[in-house]
């Protein structure tokens, strides 16, 4: 009987202690089963609360001083051109439209993965399209309409972009493709400057995302930006070619992923309206004058600002398997491809 009474007393004390922790705002973990009794969650769940705090087991709590208020996702699409400057086939060797559709579907699934993002953050999707078939644009609309979210499709007219200067490649088709790409990039930067209020995610239409991608990027942006007191660039890809360079890299803990500092990225990245305004001249230079390598102005920005890349990758860049930029290591490419069949 004493054991029963002791158990009852212990349970009462435990319940009172949990109530006290809730009142004073402390989070505790039950080591016996890895549960968090103050919030009725498991240690394996997402322990972050948008705009409030983020909790990493063993590292503790980070108070969010830099909450994310809005997110504009700007997707540059063209379902008729396979690769801008080459004729190689992409991984899985499908029509370009397949990659575009699966990219957009993966982003929609990622938005649906965490309902708190849809509830608490103002989100809009922009599609900047060049020369896609009418039926492909209808398919894009149908994919986005599966979720209740604002979106806008912008059709480019290349005759309006006389300011763009491309390198002479002695190939009019490739030069025209590059001009269209740069026009899309320029338009995306203008939209970000004129219409966005906070974070902007620039996406090319051959990046298929994991379902947790946007959640991890948003929560990690809040966490790391709050800890460091500065704005960031986030790239969703763990590019293998960067591992071939013996460069120093700092490792940070995001929400559920590790993030490492990198000095280079391609044109799919997330950043803030503040940094877009700060480096407006550099971004415009990149979108109006073709350089070699193309992303040179962006990489110069990374010499002054932090660009972070996830380990492992949050998305798959559907390039040729032998591309110098390659496929991110340690993720199941086929599984990610199959999961986003439309």
Image: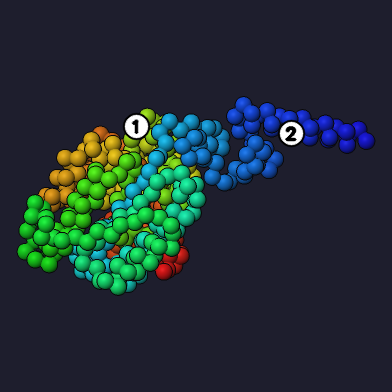
Say which residue appears at 74% left-offset and 32% top-offset. Answer: 14
- Asked if residue 193 can be seen in this view, the reply is yes
The quadrant of the picture occupied by the N terminus is top right
Of badges 2 and 1, the one in the foreground is 2
Residue 41 location, quadrant: top right
Residue 288 in percent (x, y) is at 13, 50
Horizontal side of 62 relative to 179 (left or right) equals right
Nearest the eye: 41 or 141: 141
Nearest the eye: 190 or 91: 190
Q: Label 1: which residue?
A: 230
Horizontal side of 37 relative to 253 (left or right) equals right
How was the colour assigned to the protein in this rendering? rainbow
Residue 15 location, quadrant: top right
The answer to which of marks 2 and 1 sits earlier in the sequence is 2
Q: Label 2: which residue?
A: 15
Q: Is residue 288 above or below residue 156?
A: above
Q: For the view shown, which residue lies furthest in the top direction?
A: 24
Say which residue appears at 52% left-offset and 40% top-offset. Answer: 48
Nearest the eye: 50 or 151: 151
Q: Secondary structure at mark 2?
A: helix
Across the whole image, how many numbered discs are drawn on residues? 2
Q: Residues within 10 Å of mark 2 (few under 14, many from 20)?
A: some
Query: Label 2 to label 1, Cα distance in Å?
Result: 40 Å
Q: Is residue 164 above or below residue 13?
A: below
The quadrant of the picture occupied by the C terminus is bottom left
Say which residue appears at 38% left-offset and 67% top-offset. Answer: 142
Say which residue appears at 51% left-offset and 39% top-offset. Answer: 49
Residue 57 in percent (x, y) is at 56, 37
């Amino acid at each position: 009987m004493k054991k029963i009474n002791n158990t009852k007393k212990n349970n009462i004390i435990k319940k009172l202690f949990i109530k006290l922790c809730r009142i004073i705002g402390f989070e505790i973990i039950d080591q016996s089963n890895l549960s968090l009794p103050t919030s009725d969650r498991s240690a394996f769940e997402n322990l972050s609360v948008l705009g409030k705090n983020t909790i990493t087991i063993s590292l503790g709590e980070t108070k969010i001083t830099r909450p994310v208020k809005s997110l504009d996702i700007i997707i540059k699409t063209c379902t008729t051109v396979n690769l801008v400057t080459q004729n190689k086939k992409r991984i899985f060797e499908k029509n370009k439209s397949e990659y575009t559709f699966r990219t957009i579907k993966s982003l929609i699934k990622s938005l649906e993965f965490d309902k708190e993002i849809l509830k608490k953050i103002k989100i809009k999707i922009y599609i900047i399209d060049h020369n896609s078939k009418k039926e492909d644009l209808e398919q894009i609309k149908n994919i986005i309409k599966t979720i209740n979210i604002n979106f806008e499709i912008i059709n480019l007219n290349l005759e309006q972009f006389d300011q763009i200067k491309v390198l002479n490649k002695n190939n009019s088709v490739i030069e025209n493709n590059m001009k269209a790409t740069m026009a899309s990039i320029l338009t995306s930067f203008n939209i970000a400057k004129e219409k966005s209020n906070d974070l902007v995610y620039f996406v090319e239409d051959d990046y298929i995302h994991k379902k947790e991608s946007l959640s991890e990027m948003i929560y990690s942006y809040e966490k790391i930006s709050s800890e460091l007191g500065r704005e960031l660039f986030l790239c969703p890809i763990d590019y293998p070619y960067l591992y071939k360079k013996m460069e120093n890299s700092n490792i940070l803990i995001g929400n559920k992923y590790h993030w490492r500092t990198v000095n280079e990225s391609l044109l799919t990245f997330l950043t803030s309206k503040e940094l877009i305004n700060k480096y407006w001249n550099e971004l415009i230079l990149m979108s109006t004058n073709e350089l070699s390598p193309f992303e040179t102005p962006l990489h110069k920005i990374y010499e002054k600002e932090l660009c972070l890349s996830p380990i492992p990758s949050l998305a798959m860049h559907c390039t040729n398997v032998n591309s110098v930029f390659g496929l991110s290591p340690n993720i199941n490419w086929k599984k990610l491809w199959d999961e986003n069949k439309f």
